[in-house]
Image (cartoon, rainbow, N blue to C red):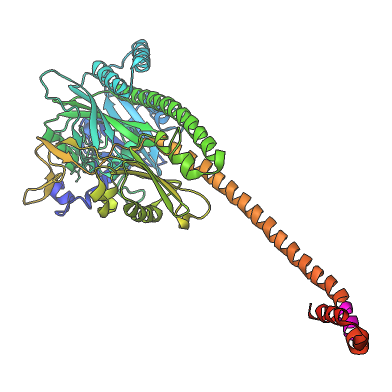
Amino acid sequence: MSSPSQLYPKKVDLTNCDKEPIHILGKIQAHGVLMVCDSAKAVTQHSDNIDMIFGESHKDILGRSIWELFKADAMEKIELSIAKGKAKSVEVKVNDKEWLLIGHENKGHYLLEFEPLDEAASALDQQQNLSTVVSELSEAEDGYAMCRATARLIKDFMGYDRVMVYRFDADWNGTVVAEEREDHLESWLGLHYPSTDIPQQARKLFLSQGERIIVDVNAMPVPILPQLSPIDNAPLDLSNSELRAASPIHIEYLKNMGVGGTLTAAIVTNGTLWGLIACHHYSPKFLNYHKRLYVKFLSQVFAAQLVLRQSNTTLQKINKSSDVRSKLIEQVSHNWDLHGGLMDDEVTILDVCDASGAALILENKISLIGKTPSREEIQSLIAHVRNNIEGDVFHTSEIARKLPEASSYKEMASGVMAIFMGIDKKRGDALIWFKPEVLQTVTWAGNPDKPIEDNGERLSPRKSFEKWSVEQAGKSMPWEDHEVAAAAALKKSISDIIIEKYEEVRELNNKLKNAYAELETFSYSISHDLRAPLRGIDGFAQIIKEDYFESLDTYGKNAIETIIKS
Ligand code: BLA
């Protein structure tokens, strides 16, 4: 059998740890048994502990039809477990032993996973539990209280030593936001863990499966034989397997934490992983499939309630900001003065969100309000934002991370949110809001910069989870969804105003052009119409001068000279 050091290249580091193909590691956990067959129901692979089901009687079952291996009544149930769209778990009895069989199909492979049958909770109990969950969640006063209630209920129902609600941040680092634990255990509440503890392929698999148990961290995983499937000559895909053995790196991590068994359930909101419910037991712990599904269901109920509550809060805030927006537009429309109407009136753009300073850049003029960087710094910031904006709103709570020069004004503006307005983004008419730096002490479980240790032979997860405090600088409070939504809505309203104003100016321009054209025609016709009689006057005056000049008195002579000169 291959040892972990054979499975893992020596050079496991943070750049390739997220490439480990955890769905095809070729092993299952030791508490269950796996059989795989093809569409003709001939056994193609099985776990190396098949004797747990058949004893010594069926040692060599590869290639044999499962009809030969199971009695007719068991076969009926097996057929049911792998039939599409039917119940996936069935109870079967083989050699006087009862099993829970969970079946599924994956690319022409029929996976039969046998787990020990354990007493399932009664439907009535489950219903009562569920009603407790729903009422506790709806009574909770805020999101944190909901997390606490969920952790407590799952601990009560399932009996793990420690149950945590773990929330991911935007960079996939995570924090324990609620915890229920046995009294003798040290608290992990509020501890931060780096994103590398749960690499991206693990998060992806987890998101699709929703729940996963590791029964005994210290048990040897059981290999699947043969290693390559004769159906497609590839390692067996265990993505949807209940028994899939965990990656040795993760097992080592759990051992370093002193954990004996885990159950983890995904908290999914709007299609993404919001966080996890992580249950730890300090000795091995098996929870049957139905109870696991129940935990999965509870975490779905929790996620749905969370989304509902967040949407309600967001909606309330959006409504409030919509009033602010209407007032701003009204102010601007009074005398078409954006600078005055947005920055220097009863309501200002600072009321749109929770910002401590803001700037308006419009028609090459910059107006400032509250605490802001200087005009020159804002000009340079605008250029950065213009190159990095995706969608309608740019926002970051750590501007200096991408724009190092911004660290000189991080105290007043670590957080930046910006929108461009009007027709010409290149001209850079923009609104920018600032949030100040919030210095925080973040406590990590172990040194987050060294999630991996080099023990000479190969690299392994960190061994120490000793609290590690780091002063966090250069970061503001985050921009909440409703603030970003308010900025986007304001962008639209102001752009409309600017476009309206632009249209108005264009119309005036057209009118002016027409007026000029008319004036030109007018003056042309005037000059044309006047020229003819003038030429007549001039001609006749010339005749008088040439033929009758001497018969005129001095006054008449002067008059003729004046007509010709004029
Ligand atoms: C998986 N790591 C996980 C999972 C969790 C954590 C919850 C999924 C669990 C599961 O699928 O059963 C991490 N567990 C935590 C954290 C807490 C907790 C943070 O209880 C906090 C309270 N792990 C490392 C390093 C690597 C790593 C350095 O620490 C990689 C180099 C890998 N973690 C890793 C892998 C998996 C994992 C590969 C997937 C395990 C599997 O499904 O096979």
Viewer-closest of 503 and 73: 503
Q: Using the rendered view, name the quadrant where residue 159 is placed.
A: top left
Q: Is residue 175 left or right of residue 509?
A: left
Q: Position of residue 124 (x, y in %)?
A: 37, 10
Q: Is residue 538 magenta?
A: yes
Which of 476 and 261 lies nearest the eye of the viewer? 476
**Residue 465 image offset from top left, x and y in percent:** 11, 35
Asked if one can make out residue 19 in the rendered structure from this viewpoint, the answer is no
Highlighted magenta segment, given as a residue range: 536-543
Residue drawn 31% across and 53% down?
377
Q: Quadrant of residue 316?
A: top left
x and y percentages locating residue 409 in the rendered image:
26, 47
Work out whether 384 lies above or below 177: below
Q: Is residue 313 visible?
A: yes
Against 539, residue 171 (above or below) is above
**The quarter of the displayed image where residue 213 is located:** top left
Residue ID at (18%, 32%) = 191
Please state, as top left, top right, bottom left or bottom right, where the C terminus lies in the image.
Answer: bottom right
The secondary structure that dominates the magenta segment is helix
At horizontal 24% and vertical 19% (from top left) the residue drawn is: 155
In this picture, is 250 found above or below 55? below
Quadrant of ligand 1: it is: top left
Residue 107 or residue 496, whichever sits in front = 496
